[in-house]
């Protein structure tokens, strides 16, 4: 009903509600700079996972994992926006995981791009942008998670695969096929250069497919 | 996908996701008592309202309003369960408001009852109850908000009505028509005995209608 | 010694120290509105109860019950003050329970009214009110707790009665006999319409008696 | 009504409520040691001072000054108790300042001793001490604040004197005239050896007078 | 003086104190598993940077960046230890930045490996390991930061370079040349596949040089 | 590298890093007063002690002991500075204990004076002082800890002596031999007037020796 842009992303059984909220003006320390501001917040409903987890609001502090994912989403989306063309407007992207089955952070980035696109259109309709909409959002971003399971590179791990993966990598690409973020971790096992290359290739292909779906969603 | 009982309630534009999570066992201080345990947690997504509100997890503490509503939901649902027949099981009812347009706390109670019913059935299927399902959940509860607007008693205030109401009352009734909670507040204005009576009558009728809908939802 | 208005209320063994503190000016977001501001804070000394409870300052957060009662006291007292006639002054009502034996929240409201009356007089003496004192404080409020014990409606439950009560109700009335708040809870048991009526009648009578005592206290 | 020992101390306009709470047993890490446990907590009601101060429970953390005074009171009272003779019992001394006009920490120590004495008597009556009462509480303690104002040593500074004092010293003595704590601070000004000696002499005399009053209070 | 392993790492002007602390036993939920436990904590002294930053202990919460780096260090070091061979011992690696000039997280990982090596030797000397020292620490890890500045890949960015880098990448490698973590971020700019490859090559060479220095430090 | 003044103090095995950070301007409530501002913060690295202690940033609050010592250092250093001659500049003194073996607070004060001296010289060089450097820092301060062990007064207790001391006293003196702070505590035991005098004499001698060393450090 309310938000300027709101998208429910489904990746397998993973469901993330991505909404963009716009406020005129920017935080005080940024006033007069002519630049806009964009942040993201990621959270999980307590029963998004198989076993209920405690609410971070009840525990009174946000866990390291939540912080880290919020920062990743924010960086990724800032990579596709021109804050000068946005003008002194603030956008908050909220990504709330309703149901989690692997790949929540990459689903969140992919959905948040669509919500951000709608918010920029809404701002354009209100004549509040400093530049043209196409200059404000000059790139698209999409993201996938890939991993190595039993020696095989795999795209879009669900939760059960994620747990047994030897290597786990999150990749954020632009619609033009460039990289915004590459985060590969081998806690269960280390990985060789050839494996790194195979994962990056697989991720780039996955991101390209998502970019096509995003264009469809925006056009529709 | 995951929860033992999960219900998405819609009251006008208000949407609340109510889920019940079951754990075997009870908090340590209650062990060996033979009694079960039931709590509720209420929360709003930041963009459930017209203007984005800050996350309580980010602020690091839960506001008074959130606490108060969580406590109300917990009391109301404990009124319909026999903790002895439940046996040493714990149930948490999470009520997350996805979209808010008035009456979120009463929608939450009404939906939580259905989620609780499913959870008790699930426990029965697992043969984990100490008593019979009908003894465990020996009553139903439903809730409505009523108010006086321009001198007229009104059922189910939406947000815009709520703001201008002279008197605002939340009523929780059992399926048999008895009262569990009556909370009437006249911050804008005080109210006379006759108005109190009219509001209570109106609320009782509304709760009875919801009780019928709950039975249908459970049967279906 | 210090406060603009300070009252020690005794209801049976319950003792609550109610003080009103006045500051010129209002919170920043309210400046220039011409309206005053009134809030209340309720707290219990750790040894007010039979068993020592931990300090909320030591635990680092305020419990849900404390929040809820502070909000109730604030709403009740705002019902009797005209914030426009008060002008841009802020009043904080502190209600600190020195000894608790049931009915602390209703004792707090009843005493806070007297402290508020003194504070308004003090402001009048300082010529700081925007309107006349009688317009500023255009109503009185008093409060009682009532309950049903063994099937009988009872006024002013002490702690031991409170624990065994089937139904527990807090009622705030104006001096003219109208209602400001009605909060009835049946956690031990539900209650029928006739019982609700009996409790409300009993509470209204109790509030009227307290209103008379408040007038005496103010006059004296 | 409730506490095992409870004393309202008045030093000039300063009023401190000191209560002792006894629990059987000690914190887990101390179990089986045969030793008791004694702690103290100091707090000020928000309107104890001329200008209302914010509640530490509302701010969510305890200030440095409160911590420091709580620790001082705890140390001073532990100096007069034999934790082995106390046996595995825990005593909490709560010192809540109702009205503050200088010297609150020394009033708190002096009053807490009397509350502690009563609590030890109560434990003796319950036959819960490991040793004899006289061995448990083998010393008394009392405390005064002294200062130099305009070059003159002064006993028992009230708030207005405290603010202008060049040197401020808190001294805790035993009934036998030995020292438990000497805390002298010259923020406004430094002090010479002769001034230190004069302050210590004056404080020792003041403590002796209080020790006599404590004996009377206990005897009465 | 005290720690089981303690190393002061200097990378250019960056100085990080890495210490390993050993405790017998593991957290309660891990008892009886036969597995050890290893965590890391990263922090910066307030004046490590050019402009003093506020202490996280004073602010009352740890920032997202600190959390993220602590987690990265922990994952990297767990990649080189066999928790089964470690036995039920806990190791905490503290990395405190005394002076910061870019690359603090990679310096911390590289130094923490040496501190961890000393701690494992110390445990071996105390005969507290479940397996042989060489099995406990079956790999070494070292880390570098690389980036693209003005189109050129660069190793070991200092703070001023870091700020202007288009792309920033942290890479953790084993002594055998495999990858543990690859984290590349293009907040200022995106990066093509060829640039990714060049950065990874450069990082692998840098890590190999550090691995040789670590061997020297351990041998010496 | 960075700070305006930075000193590593070594007292026996105790090592404290004292740095002074200067900012132009003062906190908002002090603006326009013409007065400067000086505060101090004390902290211990987790592994400064024999047994690792938890980080206060991780625990989310600062302990009472840390607060108390920070306040003591701040008061002591404010005693030697003329805030009017300093002008509207703010100085923060950070005292971080890298290794602790008794006497950390007195080492911190003694080192902080030297760091403060350097910061004042730096401000003079920048022509930012309101008065002459010699008027700004019109006194020096140094501090020692003394105690009674086995009946004997002792200077500079190391950790093992500190633990067994009957009486423990921290004394802060000016270079001219006057007293700024005298804090004596007899938790293990009380002390007689003669013992107090002996400790004060010993401390004054120790402070004088340190004052000479400070002069050398500043001159060098």
Image (tube, coloured by chain):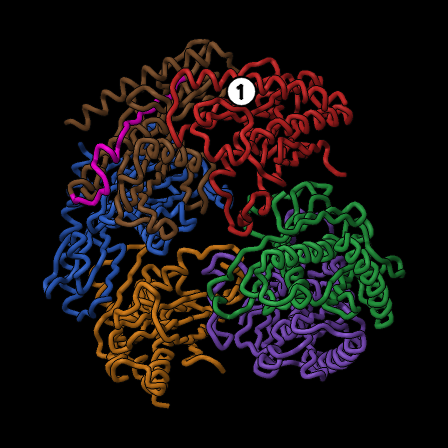
Chain colours: A brown, B blue, C orange, D purple, E red, F green
Q: Is residue A18 part of the magenta span, yes or no?
A: no
Label 1 crowd bin: few (<14), some (14–19), many (20+), radius 10 Å:
many
Say whether residue E5 is left or right of residue B212.
right
User: What percent of the width, then of the height, locates residue B157?
Assistant: 16, 54
Tag count: 1
Determine the residue positioned at 75% across, 38% down.
E2
User: Badge 1 sits on which subunit?
Assistant: E
Q: Nearer the viewer, residue C168 or F139?
A: F139
Magenta range: A126-146
Q: Name the element at disc 1.
A: helix
Q: Quadrant of residue F22?
A: bottom right
Say whether residue A26 is left or right of residue D22.
left
User: What percent of the width, then of the height, locates residue E161?
Assistant: 50, 32
* Extreme residue in the bottom direction: C220
User: What percent of the width, then of the height, locates residue C201?
Assistant: 23, 71
Say whether residue C165 is left or right of residue E128.
left
Q: Is residue A134 part of the magenta span, yes or no?
A: yes
Q: Nearer the viewer, residue D214 or E4?
A: E4
Determine the residue positioned at 38% across, 73% down.
C107
User: What percent of the width, then of the height, locates residue C45?
Assistant: 50, 66
> On screen, F51 above or below D134?
above
Q: Quadrant of residue B218?
A: top left
Q: Quadrant of the N terminus of chain F?
A: top right
Q: Nearer the viewer, residue B125 or F218?
A: F218
Can the viewer see residue B67?
yes
Can the viewer see residue D126?
no
> On screen, A210 above or below B185?
above
Say whether residue E62 is left or right of residue C182.
right
Residue at the spot of label 1: E203
Determine the residue positioned at 80% across, 55% down.
F216
């Amino acid at each position: 009903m309310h938000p300027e842009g709101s998208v429910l992303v489904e990746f397998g059984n993973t469901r993330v509600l991505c909404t963009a909220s716009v406020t005129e003006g920017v935080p005080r320390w940024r006033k007069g700079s002519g630049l806009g501001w964009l942040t993201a917040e990621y959270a999980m409903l307590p029963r998004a996972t198989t076993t209920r987890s405690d609410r971070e609001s009840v525990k009174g502090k946000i866990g390291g994992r939540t912080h880290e994912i919020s920062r990743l989403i924010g960086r990724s989306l800032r990579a596709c926006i021109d804050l000068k063309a946005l003008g002194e407007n603030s956008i908050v992207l909220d990504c709330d995981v309703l149901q989690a089955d692997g790949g929540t952070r990459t689903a969140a980035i992919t959905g948040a791009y669509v919500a951000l696109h709608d918010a920029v259109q809404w701002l354009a309709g209100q004549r509040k942008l400093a530049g043209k909409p196409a200059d404000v959002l000059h790139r698209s971003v999409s993201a996938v998670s890939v991993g190595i399971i039993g020696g095989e590179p795999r795209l879009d791990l669900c939760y059960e695969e994620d747990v047994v993966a030897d290597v786990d990598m999150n990749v954020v690409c632009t619609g033009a096929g460039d990289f915004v973020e590459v985060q590969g971790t081998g806690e269960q096992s280390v990985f060789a250069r050839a494996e790194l290359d195979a994962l990056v290739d697989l991720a780039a292909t996955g991101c390209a497919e998502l970019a096509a779906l995003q264009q469809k969603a925006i056009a529709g």
